Amino acid sequence: MKIAVLDDNLKVAKQLANWDALGDEVVFFENVIAAADCSRVLADFDVIVAMRERTRFPAALIHALPNLKLIVTTGLRNNAIDLIACVDKNVTVCGAPGDDNGSVGTAELAWALAMALFKRMVQEDSNMKKGLWQTVMTPTLSGRCLGLVGAGKLGQQVARYGQAFGMDVIAWSPNLTDERAQAAGVKRVDKHALFQNADIVCVNLVLSDKTEGIIDAACIEAMKSTAYFVNTSRAGLVDLAALKTALQNGKIAGAGLDVFETEPLPADDPWRHVPNTLLTPHLGYATTDNFNAYFPNVVAAIDAFKKGQPIRVIQ
């Protein structure tokens, strides 16, 4: 079989697993393949290894790949793959999990962004290197309000960080109940109240048809002028035009963003020049712990498929 490993931006996939054990030809793609080129570039491959949702696999592409038999995605879900089309074409889709505590990396990054924004660390570092000294005063986190959009596993981890710093933690999501909020140690509020009262808004939701655009212009408009917005989940959850306008007009204090509508973010993308932002290149999942688990699990999934016993099948 011929195997394509996509979106190996960090150039580590080859060294993190024993691909030779498969006895197959493996080609590693370090750069993103343009959507228009995918059907041509990937036409000869029997197996495609997808890095999360970086490359999209709509029905048209799946049906255009004559040899495709198996897609293995890092992680255990991938909304960029048309699973119905895979069933129609008899293509098996399997997941390759990361570290058992894989979401910790995303929670840590969310908190790092929040801390850096609140303490104006990027600005002060830049000013220090320009020869300046003490150009701003910063507030303390203790006694401030952390607002969580989503209080699942990831949100609860962020909540614990906030509580450790003495913050009051409130939360909202479409399915959050008082009972679940209490179990998570947070206070459930309505959507408007969260954005109106939070000093830091942290987004921790899964993107789906029901949650796409759930943080709309009204949410952004309700935020305090001194509040910060942090998103390490998915860009599609947010009205990005409204967020950009608020940042450009100083309606909110700043934003820490790890996720973008187009990834990798083009070099000339306007988001690279929006003021009062701290940007990271989707680092939440890109931990050594996750990657050390992803690729051995990918190889195991391919090996199991070759033996006629696919594992961690996604349906």
Image (cartoon, rainbow, N blue to C red):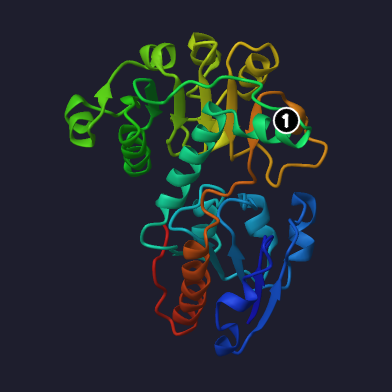
Q: Is residue 308 left or right of residue 135?
A: left
Q: How many marks?
A: 1
Label 1 packing within 10 angstroms: few (<14), some (14-19), many (20+): some
Residue 4 percent across, percent down from the top left: 67, 71
Q: Is residue 264 left or right of residue 199?
A: right
From the viewer's side, name the closer residue of 9 and 125: 125
Q: Residue furthest right?
A: 268
Q: Is residue 270 left or right of residue 181?
A: right
In this rendering, the answer to whether 252 lies above or below 211 is above
Which quadrant: the N terminus?
bottom right
Q: Amino acid at mark 1?
A: Asn
Name the residue rendered at 60%, 46% in the picture: 282
The residue singled out by tag 1 in the image is 127
Which quadrant: the C terminus?
bottom left
Residue 165 percent across, percent down from the top left: 35, 33
Residue 242 percent across, percent down from the top left: 62, 17
From the viewer's side, name the closer residue of 10 and 238: 10
| Residue 94 visible in this rendered orientation of the protein | no
In this rendering, the answer to whether 48 lies above or below 255 is below
Name the residue rendered at 36%, 38% in the picture: 161
| Residue 247 visible in this rendered orientation of the protein | yes
Name the residue rendered at 34%, 20% in the picture: 143
Q: Can you tell which quarter of the image residue 49 is in?
A: bottom right
In this rendering, the answer to whether 20 lies above or below 167 is below
What SS does tag 1 mark?
helix
In this rendering, the answer to whether 283 lies above or below 200 is below
Name the residue rendered at 55%, 34% in the picture: 116
Q: Can you tell which quarter of the image residue 99 is in?
A: bottom left
Residue 182 percent across, percent down from the top left: 18, 30
